[in-house]
Amino acid sequence: MKPNSPPRGKNNMLLGRVIGNVVCTMKNASLTGQRLLIVQPLDRHGRDKGRPIVALDSVGAGAGETIYWCRGKEASFPYLPAEPPTDATIVGIVDTVNIPGNG
């Protein structure tokens, strides 16, 4: 199993926290105008989980915000019909996390 990938058979959201940004002097032409952010994946309790990743930002997330991200082929879906070369994309900013049964 790849690092940062959810366990098979479980319905897990991919949560993360924006911890920085990436500045590129050269990048793929289809990424022109797109922001690249550094995301620290989080577990369901908001603790760091695994190593940071670089993700395209489709929602205007900022430093310190908790975000929802996706990976794989779905990471390019927010940009359809274009298909930028990305393996991870931020697709939502999280306001709150509610874990039922954890009073």
Image: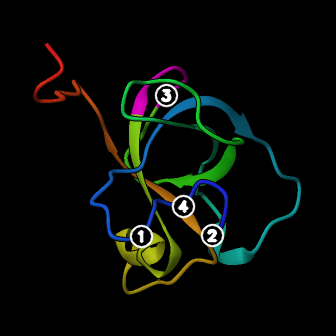
The kind of residue on which mark 3 rests is Gly
Task: Evaluate if marks 1 and 2 touch, with contact meaning CB atoms under 8 Å apart.
Answer: yes
Give the residues in magenta: 62-66
Tell us which disc is closer to us: 4 or 1: 1
Task: Evaluate if marks 2 and 4 touch, with contact meaning CB atoms under 8 Å apart.
Answer: yes
Extreme-right residue of the structure: 25
> For numbered disc 1, what is the local secondary structure?
loop
The C terminus appears in which quarter of the rendering?
Answer: top left
**Which one is earlier in the sequence, the residue at label 1 or at label 2?**
2
- Is 93 above or below relative to 65? below
51 or 76, nearer to the observer: 51
Q: Which mark is residue 5?
A: 4
- Could you classify mark 1 by the number of other residues whose Cα lies within 10 Å: few (under 14), some (14-19), or many (20 or more)? few
Tell us which disc is closer to us: 2 or 4: 2
The kind of residue on which mark 2 rests is Met
- Position of residue 80 in the picture relative to residue 64 (left or right): left
> For numbered disc 2, what is the local secondary structure?
loop
Report x, y in % for residue 9.
Answer: 33, 70
- Inter-mark Cα distance, 4 to 1: 9 Å
Task: Evaluate if marks 4 and 1 touch, with contact meaning CB atoms under 8 Å apart.
Answer: no
- Is 30 above or below relative to 58? below
Res 84 → quadrant: bottom right
Report x, y in % for residue 1.
Answer: 63, 69
The kind of residue on which mark 1 rests is Arg
Residue under pointer 3: 62
**Which one is earlier in the sequence, the residue at label 2 or at label 3?**
2
94 or 15, nearer to the observer: 15
Residue under pointer 2: 1
The figure's colour scheme reads rainbow
